[in-house]
Amino acid sequence: MGFGRPLFRGLGLLLLVLLLACQPQAPSAIPAGESAPKRGGTIVVAVTSDPGQLNPAITTAGPTHVVADNIFNGLIQFDENLKPQPALAESWAISPDGKAYTFQLARGVRWHDGKPFTSADVKFTFEEVLLKFHARTKAGLENVLTGIDVPDDYTVVFRFREPYAPLLRRLDVVEATIVPRHIYEGTDILKNPANNRPVGTGPFKFVEYVPGDRVVLERNDDYFRPGLPYLDRVVFKVIPQPSTAVLALEQGEVDYLWTVPGPEIPRLQANPGIILAKAPAGPGGSFCIDTLIFNMRRPPFNQVEVRRAFAHAINRQQLLEQVYFNQGRVATGPIASTMTWAYTPDVTRYDYNPNEAIRLLDGAGYRPGPDGRRFRVTFVHASTYGRVAEVIRDNLARVGVDVELVTLEFNAAVDRVFVKAEFDLGIASYCNGPDPEIGVTRMYVSSNIKPIPFSNGAAYVNPQIDELFARAATSVDEARRAAIYHEIQRVLTRDLPYLWLIETEGYRAFRKEIRDLRIWAGDLLERAWREQTR
């Protein structure tokens, strides 16, 4: 998800009005002295996890979005400053009371199977797919959206109970992928064969998916954005070991890495043929926090004292230094510090303090037995979190907690934690858009305790929190929204349904002949091209 790292200000109604009636933009001009884009060629992208399926409208999982966001479109897309620009919607207008958004759709757009794209696809996507299966969109819109009207084939109207400022920020391909009604209507959305053989409107068309090995895409010659894309072909190669992927990049076998191991950064920085780009996020959102999930459905995590004990027992500074190689910072709560307008440091803190952890566990009735152990918990995690899990296991052993590590492939871990809820501890990278309404809300509102990936995995219920998030979503005053989000952070850090570990940052790496990657957006490759060297 190599996004840029602007510091966002809250989206108030005034800002939204300034974005009215946007018109499509041509590809950016080529600066003097630089080569013009060249058509043709192939780019090989290394990914560490298999996507599992290729419908990004039913998941916020990064491995799916890395690939599929290049097959589909949203109503809008973001420029380098994450300002909304036209995509499937050519223009939009907001009613004076801020309760209705009217979108005029691009004409002449066709799905990859040749069927025409219309407003009916947008209405179906939101009502039957996104609002049921996409954790962030569902949590954000289901309680504020009153209806979607389609007065004609090229007009869509979203109607809200109250003014809803964040809407434009949640309509890109990551947050609101538009899928074809003619393929999904009347089917089991989660089991439709098109989830593995997708039909989109995007710059690239699906060719082949070999699970655990590769996904191959080819240029959409009928793409509705003139002149794009430049590439003929894109191959996403699954390479689970990041160090192996680095070697493949150096040897020219792959062109782009989503993950760069910390120890490899100096070596790649010294390589004149490779470019490193700092990236605070992934394809699931703009700000990501690696987060420990307490399963509050079962003991011992139904007791706040135990959750607080775990927070004091886990050495997050050790994680930052030894596992993340200082790529990021220790998190203080549910909103990343880089989201400056909504963040507050005035929260309950849980510094590393094993003695306090022991005191809390004793007080909760979990005293050590003759063998020194208090209880045993299972920690379900994807293999990519292996080193994180080992450190947490060792930290907790020091306070008498026995941790059984259950290491699974990424998609299997997601299913075990979020769909089946068969775990004591879980872990996920919860990523958010440029507004807390896009990504934070879904983790805490009780209406989102559903078998949906990256939803309220802790099963946390607090009516006060539900009401605070609802108020924040419908306010258009930035200062008022910030105050509400500050209170949300104070309540959540006291209740501690999750332990926020690390606000992650990292690097993406690519060969220097690869140009114009949209590293801040989900549709990474729309305008990318490969400079032909002789």
Image (cartoon, rainbow, N blue to C red):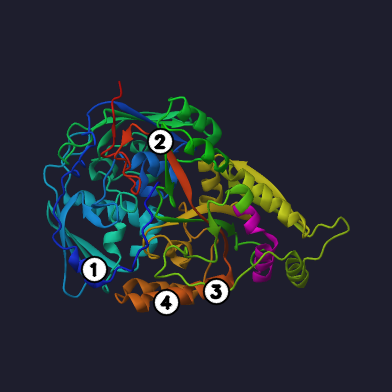
Where is mark 3, residue-wise? Answer: 347
- Identified at 20% across, 37% down, the residue is 228
Please state, as top left, top right, bottom left or bottom right, where the C terminus lies in the image: top left
The residue lying toward the viewer, choosing from 287 and 72, is 287
Q: Quadrant of residue 158?
A: bottom left
Q: Is residue 340 above or below residue 323?
A: below
**Residue ID for mark 4:** 484
Q: CA distance from mark 3 to mark 4?
A: 13 Å
Instruction: Name the spot of residue 125 as percent of width and height, x first.
Output: 28, 51
Q: CA distance from mark 1 to mark 3?
A: 30 Å
Magenta-tinted stretch:
303-320
Q: CA distance from mark 2 to mark 1?
A: 35 Å
Depicted 377 relative to depicted 186: above or below: below
The alpha-carbon separation of the residues under discs 1 and 4 comes to 20 Å
* Helix, strand or loop under label 2: strand
Q: Residue at x 38, y 58 (%)?
A: 433
- CA gap, disc 2 to disc 4? 41 Å
Residue linked to disc 1:
15
Query: Does 235 lie within the magenta span?
Result: no
Instruction: Say which amino acid is labelled 1.
Output: Leu
Q: Nearer the viewer, residue 341 or 226?
A: 341
CB under 8 Å between discs 3 and 4: no
